[in-house]
Amino acid sequence: LTDAVVASSQGTFRPDRERDELPLALQTPEHPGRTRGKGVIPLKIGFKEDIHTYRSRMRSKRDTEAKIADLEYRVLSYELSMQEEVARKVDERMAAHRS
């Protein structure tokens, strides 16, 4: 929990309704559609300041896009490292063949 609070205070973690410090620390998602500590109150009433993000499809799409961007970056970095490795191996073989 302290790591989540520190990350939040440093700006590396931004709480978003049911994705706040507690679920991050417990590594379990919040029960969907419930407001913790306020009884059986829907999220749109419990988090009025976040009413513009009530439709989870927007957040889900944003999360999916972030995951895709991360995967694309990882694939590109792996491709680059593989190209460098192949070039290095070719240079080694060519140098050994010349000798």
Image (cartoon, rainbow, N blue to C red):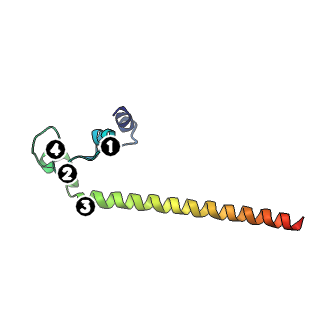
* Mark identifier at residue 35: 4
Amino acid, disc 3: Arg
Q: Position of residue 11 (x, y in %)?
A: 39, 40
Badge 1 vs badge 4, beta-carbon distance below 8 Å: no
Kind of residue sitting beneath label 4 = Thr
Q: Which residue is labeled 1 in the image?
A: 27
Comparing labels 4 and 2, the label whose residue is closer to the camera:
2
Q: Establish if 31 lies above or below 77.
A: above
Q: Nearer the viewer, mark 3 or mark 1?
A: 1
The disc at residue 32 is 2
Question: Tag 2 or tag 3, which sits nearer the N-term?
Answer: 2
Is there CB contact under 8 Å for labels 4 and 2? no
Which mark is on residue 57?
A: 3
Of the image marks 3 and 4, the number of the one nearer the N terminus: 4
Residue drawn at 85 percent across, 67 percent down: 97
Q: Quadrant of the C terminus?
A: bottom right
* Secondary structure type for disc 1: loop
**Distance between the alpha carbons at the discs numbered 3 and 2:** 13 Å
**Quadrant of residue 39 within the rendered picture:** top left
